[in-house]
Amino acid sequence: MQTSLEKEKEFFVDYTDSFLEKENTTLNENINLKKTHSLRVTQHALKLAKSLKLDAHAVELSAIIGLFHDIGRFTQYRDYHTFSDKDSVYHGDLGIKVLKDLQKSHAFSATEWDVILTAIHNHGLPKIESNLSDETLLFSKIIRDADKMDIFYIVDAYYKSMLKGKRNVALELGLENEDKLSPSVFDSFMNEEIILKSDMQFINDFKVLQAAWIFDLNFEYTKNYIKETEYLQSIIAQITVPDKREIIKEKAENYLASTG
């Protein structure tokens, strides 16, 4: 007998594959990128929830939130040809609309449904909303950490591919590929602040924004993952402003060393 998670995975794969178009290489590449990202986040969320010793139901719910957290990305890319929320719509809320239109609430209790939608809404915000229940806050933190774990992997691989001349403009969010770093982005990092996407102008800014995620990690499991994988170090090494890069590297190393 299938578990709820297995059933939802089947649904998710069928749903995302419906966006694929014959001979549309660019669209298919980006649809598959977000599909595989979501499947990996599902596993990260499941393992993270297990590390917190949550019960089986909470572990499965964490994984289902991971599966659906980016479900708005597929219509976003099809309709707007971008993953930039600034140039389209916030993908978290678009995902909520998609799930409602698909009538996915029928598969969950009212409490589960509320947790799923609230966590999806919060996963991509600069900060989690302040009015959440303890239960919903926990699941929102889990998906935010699980999402970051996989994005570190994705962007590290992408920045390395850029060195070989391979580009995917959808991942660059329309940013300028110059050897520059916005002063406000650098200052925010040094102040251990979350950097807003609206403050970015250069791809280097995006790299620093991602590095600044270390200031928004919620669990020791996630921090240990970041330390062990070395994706962070690799991303920082690819910042093409040498003087600022070394300061950022030292700041990140000292921060991680001081937090466990």
Image (spheres, rainbow, N blue to C red):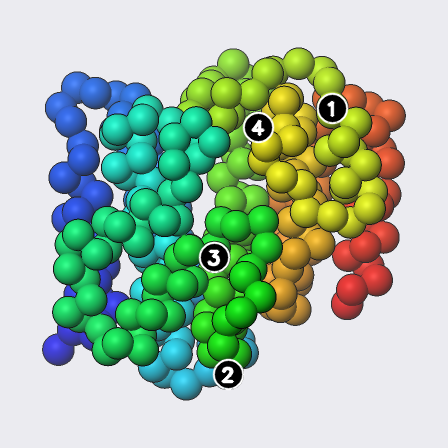
Camera-nearest label, 4 or 1: 1
Tell me, for residue 164, which label it has, or none.
none
Tell me, for residue 181, which label it has, or none.
1
Closer to us: 157 or 245: 245
Residue at the disc numbered 2: 53
Q: Amino acid at mark 1?
A: Leu
Circle 1: element type: loop
The Cα atoms of the two marked residues, 2 and 1, are separated by 41 Å
- The residue that appears at 83% across and 29% down in the rendered structure is 244
Closer to us: 249 or 176: 176
Q: Tell me if 179 is positioned left or right of 147 in this view.
A: right
Do the residues bearing badges 3 and 4 touch, measured as CB atoms within 8 Å? no
Percent position (x, y) of residue 209?
65, 39
The Cα atoms of the two marked residues, 2 and 3, are separated by 23 Å
Circle 2: element type: loop
Do the residues bearing badges 2 and 3 touch, measured as CB atoms within 8 Å? no
Percent position (x, y) of residue 160?
57, 27
Residue at the disc numbered 4: 159
